[in-house]
Amino acid sequence: MSNETPPLLDLRNATVMRGNNVALDIGGQLELSRTLSESANAGLGIVLVMHHVPKIIPEIERGVLLQKERVLADGPKEKVLTSVHLPALFGAHDRVFREDGYSRVHA
């Protein structure tokens, strides 16, 4: 086992809206998702910070939900992005289901 730190990509709100402008159009968002998936599959570690749950790529394995600077949930993505934790965080969602590795949220 190596003690080397693996390469890491840190993205914070990469597709976030800024004012009335979206940082990436739909084509750019799709390209970013493909690139992130390819990079993760090639062994690059990715720290992805975002508020839009359906944009979280399937290769992300762990989730940490923060609320008011405290950890609300931490663990495997399937145990964190749930119908229990997300309403507690956002206050608006009823159901979370998985499709092709993505988490979908429906009120």
Image: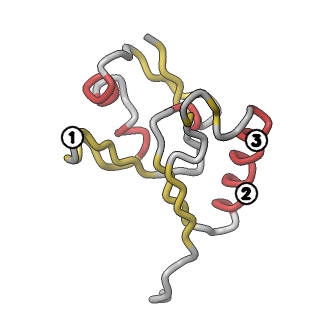
Residue 77 image position (x, y, % from top left): 43, 43
**What is the three-letter code of the residue carrying label 2?**
Glu
Q: Earlier in the sequence, mark 1 or mark 3?
A: 3
Amino acid type assigned to the residue bearing label 1 in the image:
Lys
Whether residue 30 sits left or right of residue 1 in the image: it is: right
Residue beneath disc 2 = 38
- Residue in view at x 55 percent, y 38 percent: 16
The residue carrying mark 3 is: 28
Callout 2: SS: helix
Quarter of the picture holding the C terminus:
top left
Q: Say which residue label 1 marks.
A: 68
Check disc 1: other Cα within 10 Å, few if <14, some if 14-19, many if 20+.
few
Q: How far apart are the alpha carbons under marks 2 and 3?
A: 15 Å
**Image coords of residue 54 (percent x, y):** 56, 31
Q: Amino acid at mark 3?
A: Gly
Q: Is residue 88 left or right of residue 6?
A: left
Closer to us: 59 or 16: 16
Measured in 3D between alpha carbons, the distance from the residue under mark 1 to the one under mark 2, in whole angstroms, is 33 Å
Q: Nearer the viewer, mark 2 or mark 3?
A: 3
Q: Residue at x 35, y 39 (%)?
A: 80
Q: From what the image shows, is residue 79 above or below residue 104?
A: below
**Looking at the image, how many numbered discs can be counted on the residues?**
3
Q: Is residue 45 above or below residue 77?
A: below
Q: Residue at 73% of width from left, 34% of height from top? A: 25
Q: Is residue 9 above or below residue 107?
A: below
